[in-house]
Image (cartoon, grey):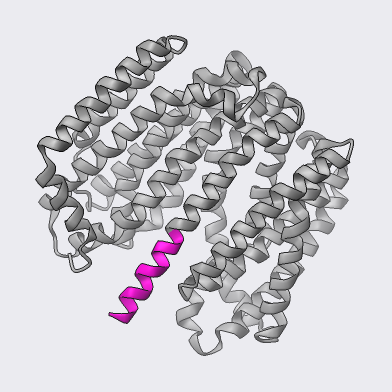
Amino acid sequence: MAVNKKIIKASLWNIIGTFLLKAMSFLSVPIFTRLMTPEDYGYISTYTTYISFIGIVVGLGMNTAIFNARMDFENRFNEFNSSIIKAALLVCACELIVANALAQWVCEPLGLTRGYLNIIFIISFAEYVVSSYYKINTVDFKFKKNIIFSVLNSIMNLSLSVVFILALNNDILGKLIGQSAFISCLAICFFYLIAFKRANAFKLSDVKYSVKVGIPNIFHHFSQLIMSQSDRIMILHYINATATAKYSVVYTYALVIQMLWNAVNEVWVPWLYRKLKVGASIQILSISKIYLTMFAVISAICILIMPDFMFIVAPKSYDDAKSIISIVILATFFLYLYSFFVNLELFHKKNQYTALATFIAAAVNIVGNAILIPIFGYKAAAFTTLISYMVLMLVHYIITDKVLKVNIYPIRFFAPQTLFVCLIAIITNIFLDKIIVRYAILSILVISMGGVLIKNKALVKNVINEIRNKKG
């Protein structure tokens, strides 16, 4: 009972933290789109993508082994962490030397200067160290510490970035210095804590163990990042930084949907796994239909109203990007759909095909961008993202249904809700400038759903109680 309470409390803190961080990330966009020119904001958005990519290889993914090591090295867990954080520093130092040696070939194609390259490496390693500290806390359900430092880092990042942008004549440099300052201080403190204070060790066997776990994850994480971030790099390459800025602003709308999905998923997955364990497929399908319908309605509402929030998120110069908001949200809906199959793979511990599925979808995204962006401009990236997420869902369906044979969801199960969201996206784009029409549709939708909920009040109450019931 005590363990259950600990897990529930930790999960609650995790949900709260997710909401806070996503909300702060979304709220920072209107500030920077007004402080910076669209061109500078486009470059910063692209540099943020570079930070994410370098962050994957900066420590060879060794900190992903922390979860396994908590069980395999229970009696010397601190010594293990001390070894791998020192090894990560050595790896980063070597990578930085190589990057500087190749700077004349690396910087120009990526739109970087040598100075920006080095700052990006500093931020990437700082984030790696902080992430390692968070992972160590996570395995012991210490989410509260993670949230405190994450929120503090977000506040200081935003505050210092604003200060340096206003103080310097170079907005890009000001944003990068503001972003690196506080997290670098955190990283120094956490590095000392992990590498020396809790334990002072360096064992080659620990490094080998972590590299063996980490390197396969690099491929998977790279594919995921290509899916979510490569659009900005390719828009910058084929069009310009201003187009990148417009696309990046629209992409922040996906954060709202993902925030809702992550929060609900924290509750959904434990219930799903309990029911899968006892083979309650009929009950899973019944409640999954309600879950799917609920998220489809939420996505439809967001598609209908979010174009009208563009004036809050960015100045008028970004307005022509409104037409792809519905496409970006629709793409996020397909990302949600693919989780139905991934959850089955993870439950059956058959996730060896996950990287392959992500790689296929990422390849579709890159090829689509390379062909369509030069012809149709930056807006084409939204459509290639949508197509790649559709491919990701279908590949995972094939994996669970045909290869692993663990699927319980027929493909037709998703058809009504998917067609509904697609129809709303099409209608929204047709009547993008007709706010009365869109809000009339929204009113009909809300009233209809309200009527359905009232009519099925007892059923809804039973479903909520069923999911909340820990014993299942």
Q: Is residue 12 magenta?
A: yes
Q: Main secondary structure of the magenta part?
A: helix
Residue range in magenta is: 1-14
Residue at the location (80% across, 57% down)?
Answer: 96
Rendering quarter of residue 316:
top right
Residue at the location (47% across, 50% down)?
Answer: 19
Pick the residue in front: 268 or 54.
268
x, y percent for residue 464: 20, 52
Q: Is residue 152 left or right of residue 444?
A: right
Where is 32 relative to 93, above or below?
above
Q: Is residue 328 magenta?
A: no
Residue at the location (61% across, 68% down)?
Answer: 132
Pick the residue in front: 28 or 403.
28
x, y percent for residue 427: 36, 14
Rendering quarter of residue 247:
top right
Q: Is residue 111 left or right of residue 266?
A: right
Rendering quarter of residue 466:
bottom left
